[in-house]
Image (cartoon, grey):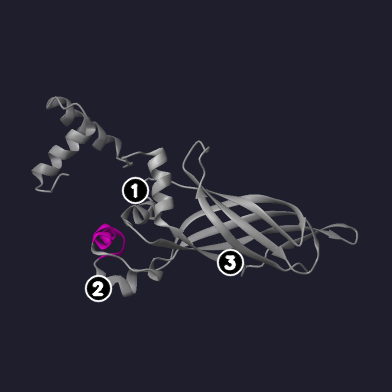
Amino acid sequence: MTDLTFIVVDILPEPYAAAPQLTARLRITESTGSVIHAIALRCQVRIQPQRRGYGAEEAEGLLDLFGARERWPVTLKPFLWMQCSTMVQGFTGQTEVDLPLPCTFDFDVAGAKYLHALREKTIPIELLFSGTVFTRGSTGFGVEQVPWDREATYQLPVTVWRELMDTFFPNAGWIRLDRDVLNALAHYKSVLGLTSWEEAIEGLLAKAGEPVP
């Protein structure tokens, strides 16, 4: 049986991706000396919000996700950020491989909403690995499963996430609206002769008494 361990060396923005993507550099070590032909690697990435502190501005941005600060002992729990996969080429002993982490700035997604609220420090993440290992067996290929308890942790700097979002969405974000709501907003914008969606939203915020930047 193989014995695999995983370490996250670094996570950086992918500058040449067509859509927002971080790339995790993984170091994989196999300690028994087995010849690994390939690994079909899967990974579940989870955010652990309870493993860091939050300033007043961050707490305000997290109200929708976790409620008021006094509720956090109950609500501040790990949650799924994404699921991803990659193929690892053959090796013996140790290798490094890039794991693509596709990201979104859709505010209907809890991970994007959480990350947008952060201003400093790091994001505690946990990577849970699974998949299929192809080895050299006595009669040809051997097939094993990556043990369910293989995992790694990493402190992702908030600045890395912000750099990625600023590259793809400079000074912008995304909100998905129901088509009927979008049509109504378009009608409101046209009737008032507004020149941008921002003006339409700012007008509605002003009527509701909300401060407009």
Residue 63 in the image, given as x and y percentages of width and height:
26, 61
Q: What is the quadrant of residue 48 in the picture?
A: bottom left
Find disc 2 in the rendering and name its residue. Answer: 70
3 or 1: tag closer to the N-terminus: 1
Residue 65 counted in the magenta span: yes
Q: Nearer the viewer, residue 91 or 126?
A: 91
Find disc 1 in the rendering and name its residue. Answer: 107
| Tag in front: 3 or 1 | 3
Residue drawn at (56%, 65%), measured in percent from left and top? 152
Image: 43 above or below 173? below
Indicate left or right for 146 with 165 as reference.
right
Tell me, for residue 183, which label it has, or none.
none
Q: What is the quadrant of residue 111 in the picture?
A: bottom left
Image: 211 above or below 120? above
Q: CA distance from mark 2 to mark 3?
A: 31 Å
Q: Tell me which amino acid carries mark 1.
A: Phe
Magenta part of the chain: 57-67
Q: Tell me which amino acid carries mark 2.
A: Glu
Question: Is disc 2 surrounded by few (<14), some (14 to 19) or many (20+) residues within 10 Å?
Answer: few
Q: Residue furthest right?
A: 139
Residue 170 in the image, given as x and y percentages of width and height:
35, 38
Residue 184 counted in the magenta span: no
Tell me, for residue 151, which label it has, or none.
3
